[in-house]
Image (cartoon, rainbow, N blue to C red):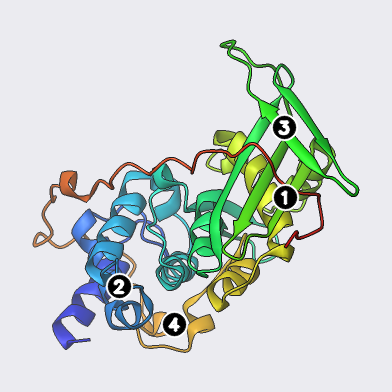
Amino acid sequence: MNDTLRERAIQAIKSSTEKGTLAGLKPQQVTDVLKTYSQQIARVIPKHLTAERVIQQAATLITRTPAIGECSIESLLGATMQASILGFQPVSALGQCYFVPFNNKKTRKKEVQFIIGYKGYLDLARRSGDIKSIYAYPVYEKDEFDFELGMHPKLKHRPSTEEDRGKLVYAYAVAHFVNGGEAFEVVTRHDVMKRKSVSQSSESEYSPWKNWEPEMWVKTAVKKLQKWLPLSIEFQTALTSDEAVITPDDFNGIGLDLGSVEYPNNDEIPAEYEEVDESDSQPAVATEPEKQPEKATEEGRVKS
């Protein structure tokens, strides 16, 4: 990190409207703060991403969602780092991960909870190289749905063609392995609500539990399926970091020493920071899940 960038980042932090956050900063100021971790991000991200791309997307997310900018800088940087390590793009529309602002009763601070979406888990599972296909879907009360366990397990789902398919009742995830084996898991409303009840940020207006509920049902099924999947180090890391508050200290890496920043009583935003056009930072549209096959196998058992 060069001295000029460090000084610009510190000046940006000092000019925030709320101490210890990035609240009120312009896009370039947020980018400067995130860039102090660019070397560390570059070392851990997969080949399909660049540190510059991750930083640009994170800065766009923070500046376009003021509530996220009001969270502690530590939790923002931690979420950005964790997304980078897992190879996720911090864009809610992609469904790989979410930065959810919430009031942490334990720390008495507004912090970012890092939440992995079901598409993130599917992506991690595919990276193992041992899975031929993996997919998951929500089930509504007007759908035709049936599954059976035992010696000859089966699963059948025919979605309703009505515009209103009714309430969510189930979700399921299916994996087909390269060696020919199969596995599936089904979760009920009770299973999903139990998972929701332990999420610290579930009541936040920015939580995927409020805005993308079907996806969270599906995610619950995918997480239940993971015990039958060949787990990569990335997948195991995801399980421990999901729905957590992460800080730069968790990475033992380079970056700003946030504790050493001295805040003035009144410091205006430097005139050198101009508004930048973020239109080029929009992500590509996420791809659709693989086509659903007709058969799967019993819950809790891998067929080979």
Amino acid residing under circle 1: Phe
Which label sits on residue 259?
A: 4
Which x, y percent locates residue 114?
54, 60
Residue 253 visible in this rendered orientation of the protein: yes
Which label sits on residue 184?
A: 1
Please name the residue shown 27% across and 75% down the image.
10
Residue 20 visible in this rendered orientation of the protein: no
Tell which tag, 2 or 1, sits nearer the viewer: 1
Judging from the image, what secondary structure is the residue with disc 4 in? Answer: helix
Side of 52 where 63 appears, left or right? right
Alpha carbons under labels 3 and 4: distance apart: 56 Å
Which is more toward the observer, 70 or 234?
234
Q: Which residue is mark 3?
A: 156
Which is more toward the observer, 272 or 86?
86
Amino acid residing under circle 3: Lys
**Which label's residue is closer to the chain start, 4 or 1?**
1
Q: Are marks 2 and 1 in contact (CB under 8 Å)?
A: no
Please name the residue shown 58% across and 66% down the image.
245
Q: Which residue is mark 2?
A: 47
Which is more toward the observer, 296 or 288?
296
Mark 4 burial class by Cα count in 10 Å: few <14, some 14-19, many 20+: few
Which x, y percent locates residue 75?
50, 67
